């Protein structure tokens, strides 16, 4: 059994490490080495997520599994969204750390993680200088990773809060050390957005478009294909090819047992997993960040592969354009502090401008949903 260092610096069994860490309220983990295997050191990556347990929406568990299955992503840090005010999902007492600890256990390596800000930005230049240190850990971890990385880093964002504060504090660092940011929020046709990630922090959402970083905007909703959303008719198709530990990871999310989360994934019993529809957004975004494209292996069978992997598999000429990014100029309309402009998150979107500040996701294939489902199923396969 894998051993790790507990808070006292002594080895502890993996089944008890999580309980000890949660009880102590550790904000940035971990005391053990956080280096990924050599073959994974390709795209330095910071993953920001509203991952919780119990789940607000289990799509975040599916996304987390995708992040750790994409071997091109060298996950340098995970920032857990701190906005939610529900006691059962408090990041300080468990929350997203539970599924994250499980996934790190499954994959056999660890990454540092921290909790993000618990409030909205008060104005576009808010630096959150006087906030509770427990919820500044996410901002500080992002800054630490950027400073220490010898090459620019890619980020995936849901709310814009923590990254916006990082930019407000260290704009030059962001310009030098951020390769790209993927923002998964909002509505693809501009105008008022009632989408969840925007409501959480509309000022932070707007601020991301003003940072000047290479920005891939992935609207959660949008007309005429300007959204990365897809709905899987029966999520059970994704579980069929998973390893047993990964199946038990998903089972823990759906069953919400009282069992120790690490012991639960090591149980050798085949779990019962629900048949139900599943709303999904982020997997194609994550695959793009990893440098993968869509390839058709056979009728109805699609893979996310790097071009090099496609050549090795003899699929070089079978790339399928399921989605793309189109240049846009996104300008916040509200122009004010949140107290004076309660309808923040209003955007003016211009397509194919001379001076784009973002690339917006667009579905390009009539079978986009079927293709994404096949790609995700194959990504999870126990190979």
Image (tube, grey):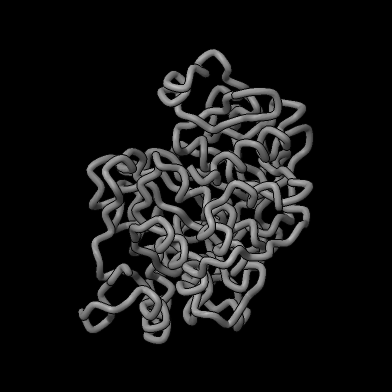
Q: Of 77 and 206, which appears nearest the observer?
A: 77
Q: Position of residue 22 (x, y in %)?
A: 42, 81
User: Is residue 287 shown left or right of residue 368?
Assistant: left
Q: Position of residue 324 (x, y in %)?
A: 60, 28
User: Is residue 342 shown left or right of residue 41?
Assistant: right
**At x 70% / y 28%, what residue is drawn?**
300
Above or below 355: residue 344: below
Would you identify the image quadrant in which residue 104 lies? Answer: bottom left
**Outermost residue, bottom side:** 23
Asked whether the viewer can see residue 72, the reply is yes
**At x 49% / y 71%, what residue is drawn?**
98
Q: Of 297 and 213, which appears nearest the observer?
A: 297
Q: Position of residue 175 (x, y in %)?
A: 35, 42
> Number of labelled discs?
0
User: Is residue 227 shown left or right of residue 30?
Assistant: right
**Outermost residue, top side:** 317
Q: Of 145 and 263, which appears nearest the observer?
A: 263
User: Is residue 34 shown left or right of residue 135?
Assistant: left
Would you identify the image quadrant in which residue 229 lies? Answer: top right
């Amino acid at each position: 059994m894998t051993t790790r260092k507990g808070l006292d610096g002594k080895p502890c069994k993996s089944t008890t490490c999580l309980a000890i860490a949660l009880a102590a309220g550790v904000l940035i983990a971990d005391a053990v080495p956080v280096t990924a295997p050599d073959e994974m050191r390709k795209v330095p990556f910071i993953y920001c997520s509203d991952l919780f347990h119990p789940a607000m929406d289990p799509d975040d568990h599916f996304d987390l599994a995708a992040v750790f299955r994409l071997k091109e992503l060298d996950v340098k840090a995970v920032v857990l969204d701190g906005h939610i005010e529900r006691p059962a999902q408090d990041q300080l007492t468990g929350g997203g750390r539970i599924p994250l600890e499980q996934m790190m256990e499954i994959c056999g390596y660890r990454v540092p993680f921290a909790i993000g800000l618990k409030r909205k930005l008060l104005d576009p230049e808010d630096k959150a200088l006087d906030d509770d240190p427990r919820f500044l850990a996410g901002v500080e971890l992002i800054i630490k990773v950027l400073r220490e990385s010898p090459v620019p880093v890619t980020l995936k964002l849901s709310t814009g809060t923590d990254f916006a504060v990082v930019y407000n504090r260290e704009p030059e660092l962001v310009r030098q050390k951020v390769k790209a940011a993927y923002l998964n929020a909002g509505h693809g046709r501009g105008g008022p957005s009632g989408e969840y990630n925007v409501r959480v922090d509309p000022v932070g959402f707007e601020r991301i478009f003003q940072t000047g970083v290479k920005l891939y905007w992935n609207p959660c909703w949008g007309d005429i294909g300007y959204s990365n959303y897809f709905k899987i008719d029966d999520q059970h198709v994704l579980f069929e090819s998973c390893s047993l530990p990964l199946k038990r990871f998903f089972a823990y999310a759906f069953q919400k047992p009282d069992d120790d989360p690490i012991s639960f994934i090591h149980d050798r019993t085949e779990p019962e997993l629900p048949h139900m529809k599943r709303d999904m957004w982020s997997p194609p975004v994550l695959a793009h960040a990893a440098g993968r494209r869509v390839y058709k292996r056979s009728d109805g069978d699609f893979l996310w592969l790097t071009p090099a992997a496609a050549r090795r598999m003899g699929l070089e000429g079978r790339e399928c354009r399921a989605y793309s990014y189109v240049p846009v100029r996104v300008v916040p309309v509200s122009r004010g502090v949140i107290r004076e402009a309660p309808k923040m998150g209003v955007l003016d979107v211009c397509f194919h401008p001379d001076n784009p500040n973002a690339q917006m996701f667009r579905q390009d294939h009539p079978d986009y949903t079927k293709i994404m489902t096949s790609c995700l199923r194959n990504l999870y396969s126990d190979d």
